[in-house]
Image (cartoon, helix red, strand yellow):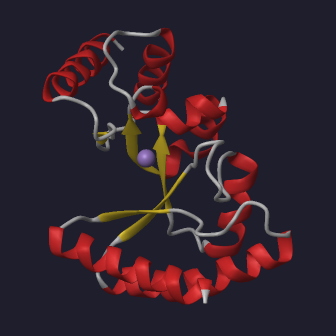
Amino acid sequence: MEVHRAVYYGKISADFAYKLGASVMVVHSNVFRRLPHDQRNLLLARIFKEIKPYAESLNLTLALENLSYASMGFGKNVAEMDEVFSVIDGGEIAVTLDFCHATATGVTQSLLETYHKRLCNVHMSNRAHKPCLEETSQLKDFITKLSKYRYTGPVTLELNRKCTLAEISSTKAVLEAVMRVC
Ligand SMILES: [Mn+2]
């Protein structure tokens, strides 16, 4: 049942991404973090056996996103994401690095060091997807590393729905200011 539901939502999302003309679709592991190792990997294999060829048929690149420590899903750090990749990946799945999740979990540097070559998407926000209203050392450090690794892909603002237009614009301005100097 869980497999059917995950596959169903995965395919609907892929259809949506395709109709939007997107080239990348962010995915999560879709498995509960407390499942035993073998069961987790069995479910992962069954879900992605369906989603991968479907996404490929629509010319979509799948990009696995790191989850927050608070998430009930599996895949919040390098060890967990490597385990997911070991089951679902034949080298074609990319990475979405969510700065908010990574910073709250304390794994920003290790994720960047490990996955910078397959990074194709960055989600940006402050803690709890709040706006970035000032330059912080963590923010500068992150943008400096992205630049050092010659990342040229998109940086997407992923702010919570309570953000005002003014806060969204300030976040964009703060990020642009950091990017100019890093
Ligand atoms: Mn995200």
**Is residue 87 shown above or below 51?**
above
Residue 27, image x, y percentages: 47, 64
* Residue drawn at point x = 27 percent, y = 65 percent: 23
Question: Is 118 left, or right, of 130 in this rendering?
Answer: right
**Is residue 83 shown above or below 123?**
below
> If the image is split into quadrants, where does the N terminus sit?
bottom right
* Residue drawn at point x = 42 percent, y = 78 percent: 9
Residue 84, image x, y percentages: 68, 65
Q: In this view of the protein, can residue 150 be seen by the observer? A: yes
Q: In this view of the protein, can residue 107 be seen by the observer? A: no
Question: Is 36 left, or right, of 112 in this rendering?
Answer: right
Residue 159, image x, y percentages: 32, 37
Question: Is 14 left, or right, of 6 in this rendering?
Answer: left
* Residue drawn at point x = 65 percent, y = 34 percent: 105
The one nearer the camera, 73 or 88, is 73
Quarter where residue 157 is shown: top left
In the image, farthest residue toward the front: 162
> If the image is split into quadrants, where does the C terminus sit?
top left
**Is residue 107 shown above or below 76?**
above
* Residue drawn at point x = 34 percent, y = 74 percent: 13
Q: How many marks?
A: 0
Quarter where residue 170 is shown: top left
Residue 169, image x, y percentages: 16, 24
Quarter where residue 20 is shown: bottom left
